Amino acid sequence: MQVREPVIHEVITEVIRTADAPQAIGPYSQAIAVRGGRTVYTSGQIPLDPKTMQIVGEGDIVAQTERVMENLRGLLAAAGVGFEHVVRTGIFLADMQ
């Protein structure tokens, strides 16, 4: 009977930071890249302007969505990827109206 030794893979993570997305407000990172698995995990995004750290488009879902997508574009670019590499996303709405 042949016994196999367990294979242990080292997970290498890299904190992603960019001025093209709002700075993290709390104990988390803007994004984390897992290099061995070539995966990037981004934090939740709200429509903050990264330069002013103010919410944009109060009551305007189009302006807010555009800001969130620009923030995500900046995070992805800082990780060396783009929207064409996104596999999964989640969108949470406060008001379905």
Image (cartoon, rainbow, N blue to C red):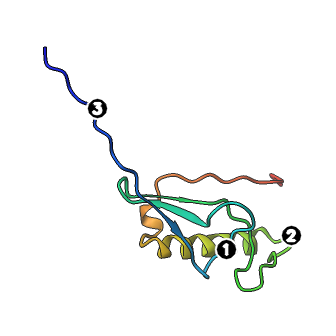
Query: Measuring 71% from the left and 86% from the top, which residue is drawn there?
Result: 51
Q: In what quadrant of the picture does the C terminus appear? A: bottom right
Local secondary structure at mark 3: loop
- Report the Cα–Cα distance between label 1 and label 2: 13 Å
Amino acid type at mark 1: Glu
> Closer to the N terminus: mark 3 or mark 2?
3
Local secondary structure at mark 2: loop
Q: Mark 3: give few (<14), some (14-19) or many (20+) Cα within 10 Å.
A: few
Q: In what quadrant of the picture does the N terminus appear? A: top left
Q: Mark 1: give few (<14), some (14-19) or many (20+) Cα within 10 Å.
A: some
Q: Mark 2: give few (<14), some (14-19) or many (20+) Cα within 10 Å.
A: few
> Closer to the N terminus: mark 1 or mark 2?
2
Residue ranking furthest to the left: 1
Quarter of the image for residue 61 reads bottom right
> Closer to the N terminus: mark 1 or mark 3?
3
Amino acid type at mark 3: Pro
The location of residue 29, given as percent across then percent down, is 62, 64
Q: Nearer the viewer, mark 3 or mark 2?
A: 3
Q: Check disc 1 and report the residue beneath it.
A: 66
The location of residue 2, given as percent across then percent down, is 14, 19
- Report the Cα–Cα distance between label 1 and label 3: 47 Å
- The label on residue 6 is 3
Query: Measuring 86% from the left and 73% from the top, which residue is drawn there?
Result: 58
Residue ranking furthest to the top: 1
Local secondary structure at mark 1: helix
The location of residue 81, given as percent across then percent down, is 42, 70
Q: Nearer the viewer, mark 1 or mark 3?
A: 3
- The label on residue 59 is 2
The location of residue 27, given as percent across then percent down, is 70, 60
95 or 18, which is in the foreground?
A: 18
